[in-house]
Amino acid sequence: MPANDTLPPPEGYLWLTEAARRLGVQPSTLRKWRLQRKGPASFKHAGKVMYREDSIPAYLAACEAADSRSNPELNPLNRRPEPRIGTRRRAAA
């Protein structure tokens, strides 16, 4: 029987190494994100970390939506300036 690394993942799922390749990061980065609870949703199956294939594009879309350069609503240059709230120093008595 072949080793677990050579078996393909179930239909619609990715092993950690393939998910890292699709995200353009090292597998070690994806492992670190998993420990920090960042990155795309993941889970363990048969002792290996897996990702849904559709979670990768969803994660990238969420990253894009959260970036002020690609989301005009978040761009601080598109907002009206907030009024300054100054504090006056009181003269010493």
Image (tube, grey):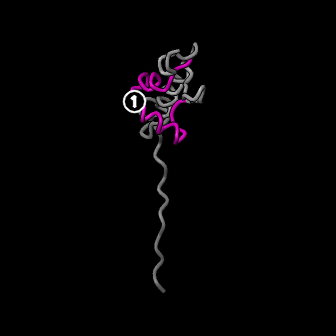
**Where residue 48 appears, x then y in whole percent?**
54, 28
**Depth check: 63 or 54 in front?**
54
**Where residue 84 appears, x then y in whole percent?**
47, 56
Residue where numbered disc 1 is placed: 25
Give the answer, above or below, for where 70 lies relative to 13.
below
Crowd band around label 1 with a 10 angstrom C-alpha radius: few (<14), some (14–19), many (20+): few
**Where residue 12 appears, x then y in whole percent?**
57, 15
Give the answer, above or below, for where 18 lies relative to 78.
above
> For the view shown, which residue lies furthest in the bottom direction?
93
At x 52%, y 37%, the residue is 34
> For the view shown, which residue lies furthest in the front direction?
1
Amino acid type of the residue that numbered disc 1 sits on in the rendered structure = Val
At x 49%, y 52%, the residue is 83
**Depth check: 56 or 5 in front?**
5
**Depth check: 42 or 48 in front?**
48
At x 48%, y 21%, the residue is 5
**Depth check: 67 or 78 in front?**
67
**Where residue 9 appears, x then y in whole percent?**
54, 17
Query: In the picture, residue 51 is in which quadrant?
Result: top right
Residue 20 in magenta stretch: yes
Query: In the picture, residue 70 is in which quadrant?
Result: top left
At x 39%, y 26%, the residue is 24
What secondary structure prevails in the magenta region?
helix
**Residues shaded magenta:** 13-40
